Image (cartoon, rainbow, N blue to C red):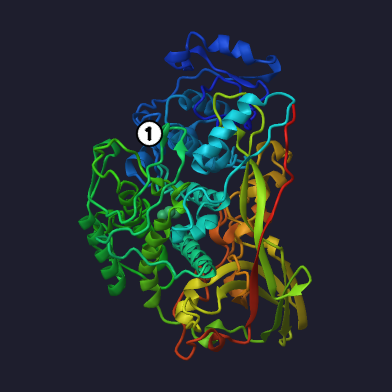
Amino acid sequence: MTDKRNLLLLFEHPTEPVFMDKGGNGTMFQVPDSYVTNRYNSICKKIQGRVSVGEKNHISVKEIPVPDISYPMTLGRSDEFSLFLKSHRQKAAHLIEIFTKMPSVEDLQSVAVYARDRVNPVMFNYALSVALLHRPDTKDLDLPSFSQTFPDRFIDSKVLRNMREESFVVQGLEARIPTVISVNYTASDLEVEHRLWYFREDLGVNLHHWHWHLVYPIEANDRSIVDKDRRGELFYYMHQQIVARYNAERLSNHMARVQAFNNLDEPIAEGYFPKMNSLVASRDYPPRFDNTRLRDIDRPVNELKVGIDDMKRWRDRIYEAIHQGYVLDMNNERVILDDVKGIDILGNIIEASELTINSKLYGDLHNKGHMLIAFSHDPSNKHLESAGVMGDSSTAMRDPVFYKWHAFIDNLFQEHKRLLPAYTEEYLSFPGIRVQSINVESQGQTNRLTTFWQESDVDMSRGLDFLPRGNVFARFTHLQHNPFTYTIDVENSSKDTRNGYVRIFLAPKLDDRNGIMSLAEQRLMMVELDKFVVTMTPGTNTFTRNSTESSVTIPFERTFRNLDSNTAPENSTEELINFFCGCGWPNHMLVPKGRPEGLSFELFVMISNYDDDRVLQDDQALECGCSDAASYCGLRDRLYPDRKSMGYPFDREPRRGAEFLENFLTPNMSTVEVTITHDNRIEKLPEVVNSC
Ligand code: CUO
């Protein structure tokens, strides 16, 4: 029987032919002659003989008649694949359909081996990943981290060059030393926006974004792959939280909140020079100079034609629909934007996913915005340049304009939310439940957290092609915080045991002018830290919870998962957990960077009635520990595990009389001031030196 784990080897060394060593130990696919591309047909066996270490490392590939893949092949092997381009999505959708419809793992392996050297490598990775995530017989597989396979999308091209040198020169028993990624490589301090490098260019943050879009594809031929529970709402919420988190980081760096890109005629003040070289395209990612203006795009090569006027029309129609309280579907029928489904409908319209109710009327605002910005340096393809970093979900968050664009997108959602009735005091309350106190403990300190820098090594060897095998590490510096524990005392004055949903948020106490923030402003900066269920017996209850258990994050090891370190037995619960936990905000970015002198935040805790919030899942048997990472990513094949609107209770304008957070509190809520101090030290890893 074909071992489904072999499919994961197809992700490795993406631009090398499929018949080369995979796994670094001489493991090879025995590719049928008819599958080998013309270039290598006559020499494939010779090459395999050179690196093969024995029969047991051979993976046999059954020769079957392969489906027609000529349509996905129309995207060039060295073109830049972009999920935000409809023509690319359609080609990927075709491939996904082929992969998902293969009747067995063995047949899937055959067609994947055939397609691998014929289609664009990034599209192949995307399509196979989506298929593996959705096929019942492969969905428990643990996909390799995208940064291992395509390191070029995450690091400086200089680092990549050094890693190549290291792998070529240092082989066999000698120890390769990690290549250090400098912390200041994309700009100098003259560029104020560069203060946010550690957020925008963080590997974990960008991996999360890629993985989120992998779990929530914009389109697929099989609608069930796209049509997931509250998908449109999750698009809004996950990106709203990114903007909120970014604003907290800006505040920490003495910068004003990000200005939404409302006026499409205005130049983009912030330039961005990625300094990355695409391995697939063998070209540098194009930069965008300061004060670049958007222009109409007409690039037949990308089947992309969109004007600024189209964008304005779509934007105005969406605003009009929000103000009227309904959208029009393709039959011109009204669909009401109510307080439950309205945000989900808008999410699918604005993104736009294929679930949009009317693409003719409301267009493709968010995706096309990414592309207008990504091609602003060459809108007519006059210079034969490819897309900038905004053109792909694995690189977009590096660019300062990403946050301006998503602040603009979020304004649309917030306009809808502003028109909904405020939550009443009664609705927010939980009779009989009172939060008595909250404490946050970290390293023996109460209500004081510390952030600092930390070095970590990530193995990138699976993405380096045409080089001797073995681990190749990049050493990068990222934000980190000391872990902490919440202690919450709750009084249950009722006679019964009650189930509560604990919702924890954090927001800056003062605004960027050092003034007290109104709740209307502060609610937009509330970042979710955790959400979990508690059982409260009559009387006083004390709950403790560790920051590492957060419902929005995944641990560092999961973000940078390494196939070699996954020793979980096949089909075990442990293996399932490994998979489900693949999507999530990186835990090292859970709290914003503090200031050296300390920065005040308000930590908010609410306990709502879990019996009202609970969602009955179809199949309780599938429940596993991974529900822990659900807040930003949902649960695979299951309903979003909270009946309330995402972001509740801060997703709407506060009621009259609750202009400030302190007036908003009902007895089942409480706040505590937490100071985050940044210690400007780097927790370094020991240096590795090679001596002759
Ligand atoms: Cu995730 Cu604009 O959707 O980047």
Residue to which mark 1 is pinned: 79
- Most extreme residue toward the left is 309
Q: Is residue 525 visible?
A: yes
Q: Quarter of the image holding residue 259? A: bottom left
Quarter of the image where ligand 1 sits? bottom left
Q: Quadrant of the N terminus?
A: top right
* Local crowd size for mark 1, using a 10 Å CA cut-off: few (<14), some (14–19), many (≥20): some
Q: Does residue 289 lie above or below 688 as drawn?
A: below
Q: Is residue 341 left or right of residue 159?
A: left
Q: Quadrant of the C terminus?
A: top right
Looking at the picture, how far across and down is residue 345, in whole percent? 38, 62
| Residue beneath the point at 56% across and 55% down | 638
Residue 502 in sight here: no
* Residue 108 coordinates in the image, percent (x, y): 53, 29
From the viewer's side, name the closer residue of 526 and 650.
Answer: 526
Amino acid carrying mark 1 in the image: Asp
Q: Residue at x 55, y 41 (%)?
A: 146
Nearer to us in this view, 360 or 147: 147
Image check: 40 left or right of 622?
Answer: left
Relative side of 277 to 609, left or right: left
Q: Residue at x 40, y 34 (%)?
A: 283
- Could you tell me which secondary element the residue under label 1 belongs to? loop
Which residue is rendered at x = 37% and y = 63% of the image?
Answer: 409
Q: Is residue 460 above or below residue 32?
A: below
Q: Nearer the viewer, residue 446 or 184?
A: 184
